[in-house]
Structures are given as structure tokens and as C-alpha cells.
Image (cartoon, helix red, strand yellow):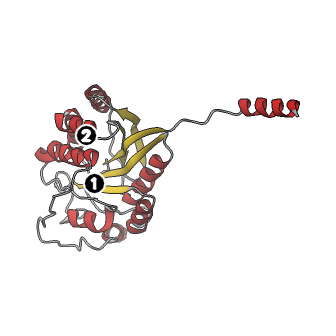
Amino acid sequence: MHRHFAFLSAAWLALPAQAQTIEVDLELVLMVDVSRSMTQNELEIQRQGYAAALRSAGVYAAVRSGLLQKVALSYVEWAGSQNVIIDWTVIESQEDLNGFADTLLNSFTIGQRRTSISEALSFGAEFIQSNSYEGMRKVIDISGDGPNNQGRPVVPTRDAVVAEGIVINGLPLMTKEGMGTQWHLDNLDYYYETCVIGGPGSFVIPVLNWEDFAEAVRRKLVLEIASLPMTEVVQPIQYALRDPSDCLVGEKIWEQRRMDWAQP
């Protein structure tokens, strides 16, 4: 019996060590749109805006307001596919935030084709569930300048992600720089509110002018990290030429453009 016990002990010790889960207040993945409809200037403004927001005193105060005062943060660019720019990083200090911002500014973005919000959300959920952190809250923060027009329909994907206990917040980019009118969706904020965001306390903060981008990101990050009550009221921007509550409107626009291109 003693030899049997010794054998079991040796076998147990030989097992590979399990990866230790790190507890944090929040797991937050920043999903940032880099689709072809974004100009190079807009892509640069996004990077600069996120970096400025991360360096702000407000975001640091939000990190310090948590029970553990620790956040797991990542930055992913998406269009039709996804590209992890900064993998999961523990944020505890102002130095951590500054380092994350520095890494972000030292990266280079190339615009990609199409817009698949659904695949971005699916990737974000898997990215959260497969990491080595366990957050009291789990959030996908997704920005975008248009509706879903590639991949699976966005609503069932959104619902599946929310069912996993992940909150989705939106940052609709409602500027028109470099975007042809055939791709523009008026009241994109309503589309995001109806079709993209979900989960307890989820919210939308629209960006109407690029000059306001860094401040919008800062407010959004403070709300997400500190889990503050949401007081934003999404207002209509202009008369919607296309129905922003139609969650397949992006696919319909794409199909119409495809038919137009096919005509002699």
C-alpha cells in the first residue's frame, strides 16, 4: 500500500502545473475599427485618442476605484478579420497606462476591407474566455464607422456573447471623412444601440467630430473601468435615409453595391 501511495504521489507531482488564474476587477478588450472606409488620418486620430485617454488622470482614478485596483486590458483592431495589437496586460498604475499608450503609438495600422462586427464580437468573446484572467466584469468595447456587412448576422452573435456574461459597449464613429455616401448610415448610434450593444449597463457614446474623439474615449473608459451609472442619452443626429434599426441594413447596402458593380 505504501508503494502504491508513493507511486500516486510521484505521478501527481509529474503532472503539468495548471496555469494560475489572475483575479482582476475587469477584463476589457478594446475592439477598434480599421476598415477600408477609415482614412489614414482617421486611423492615426484613433491611436492618438486612445493613447491620450489612457494617460488621463480620470482613467487612472477609475482603475484605483476598483476592489482589486487591477484591470486586464487588450487592444485589437478589426475589419473583416482581427489583429491583436496589444495582448492582455495588467493595469495597476499610471506607469502601466503610460506604457500601454506608448506601445500603442509605436504600432502601425493598415486599413482592411469590409466590416464584420459579428466576427469582431465573436473574436472578442473568445479572447476574453481564453485568457488567464478572471474579472468581476467582462467587457467588449467596440468602435465602428458603419453597420455589419460581412460574416454572420450581428444580432444572434451579440446575443450569444451577452449570454456568456460579457457586456458590449459601443463607440459609433459618425464622422464622414473619406467615406462615400453609399456606405454612410445616418443615426449609426441607433444601429449600435439596437443591434450591437448588450448586457447589464451597456451603453453607446457617439463620436460626431474627430476633435471630440479623445474625450469620448476617456469618458467611455472611465465609465467601463469604474462601472459608473450610465447617464448618456443617445440623441438622433439627422434624418435617417436608411433604417438604423434594421440590423441587416449593412448587408443590404453591400448587396446593392455588389449588384451595381455587376451591371455593365
Query: In x, y percent, where is residue 116?
Result: 38, 58
Q: Give percent across and percent down for residue 203.
A: 25, 58
The residue under the point 21% across, 55% down is: 229
Q: In this view, does 55 lie above or below 133?
A: above
In the rendered image, residue 159, in percent from the top left (x then y), is placed at 41, 66
In the rendered view, tell whether residue 45 sits above or below residue 81: above
Question: Which element is circle 1 on?
Answer: strand
Tell how many labels. Answer: 2
- Residue kind at label 2, given as amino acid type: Ser
Residue at screen point 86% across, 34% down: 4
* Residue to which mark 1 is pinned: 144
Q: Can I make out residue 131 in this image? A: yes
Please provide percent x and percent y for residue 237: 11, 64
Camera-side mark, 2 or 1: 2
Amino acid found under the numbered disc labelled 1: Gly
Position of 124 with respect to 95 (left or right) is right
Cα–Cα span, label 2 and label 1: 29 Å
Picture quadrant of residue 182: bottom left
